[in-house]
Amino acid sequence: MKSKIRMQTHHADQVFKEVHLERGQLLSSEFYDCVFIGCSFVESVFQHCGFVNCVFQACDLSLIQTPESNFASTRFENSKVIGVNWTQADWGVTGLWNPIGFFKCTISHSTFIGLTLRGIQIRDCVAVDTDFREADLSQADFAGTDLSKSMFGNTNLTEADLSRARNYHIDPGQNVLRQARFSLPEAMSLLYSMDIVLVEDG
């Protein structure tokens, strides 16, 4: 059964199924412990909305805009979240203590420039051409994610987990990698940015 969302209202412990709000607006609405299943919000604007402990499952949020909206402890699972400029959102203390998480999602062509999102989870995702420059992603979890063409520059990856991550290009001289975790053979790419010559034994 399809659901509808009333704007400018408070929603708690609700399940929204197959909501279609393409190119629409969601204004001044608050969601606490809500679940969105099979919904489509393509090119919609979430303005001044709050999502706390919410879950988006098998949803399409491609090209959404998020001005003044916050996403505290919100999870995206098996969803498309492509081309989103997350710098528009209101992170406040949300980014510091309640990071969002992406699990088996496609988040390609998105922007996280300059955000403080310690402990963010981006697990088993496709994150092609995603911009993480200037961001604080310490203790982030990128395990199993495809980071082809994604950009890292002055990015804090202290204690981040990039084990099983692949296709990344991260310059150790331009990023903070203290205690970050990598796995072979993908970790060999860290050497490509260094001014060294590798010689095979024998």
Image (tube, rainbow, N blue to C red):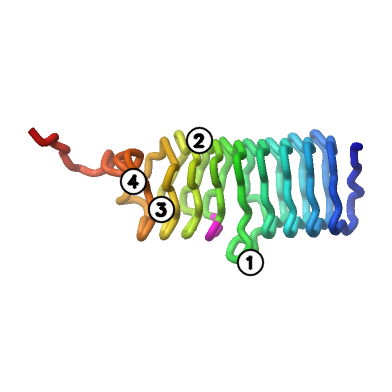
Residue tagged by mark 1? 93
**How many angstroms separate mark 3 from mark 2 (CA)?**
17 Å
**Residue 164 at what x, y percent from top left?**
43, 43
Query: Given the image, on which type of amino acid does mark 3 rest?
Result: Asn
Which of disc 4 and disc 1 is earlier in sequence? Answer: 1
Write down the residue under mark 3.
Answer: 154
Is 157 in front, or is 112?
A: 157
Question: Residue drawn 35% across and 60% down?
Answer: 178
Q: Quadrant of residue 18?
A: top right
Q: Which of marks 3 and 1 is nearer the N terminus?
A: 1
Quadrant of the image containing the N terminus: top right
Q: Main secondary structure of the magenta part?
A: loop
Instruction: Point out residue 4 in the picture as x, y percentages from the top left corner.
Output: 91, 42
Return the disc, 3 or 2, that comes first in the chain's sequence.
2
Residue 116 falls within the magenta-colored stretch: yes
The residue mark sitting in front, 4 or 3, is 4
The numbered mark, 4 or 3, whose residue comes first in the sequence reads: 3
Magenta stretch? 115-119
| Residue 156 shows up from this direction | no
Q: Can residue 18 be seen in this view?
A: yes
| Residue at 67% from the left image edge and 43% from the top image edge | 77
Residue drawn 80% across the image and 59% down it: 32
Observer-nearest of 155 and 188: 188
Q: In the rendered image, which residue does mark 2 sit on?
A: 129
Question: Which residue has dot 4 on it?
Answer: 171
Q: In this view, does 110 lie above or below 32?
A: above
Locate the C terminus by quadrant. Answer: top left
Earlier residue among tags 1 and 2? 1
* In this rendering, position of residue 120 left or right of residue 81: left
Of the two numbered discs 4 and 2 on the same chain, state the one appearing first in sequence.
2
Give amino acid for label 2: Asp
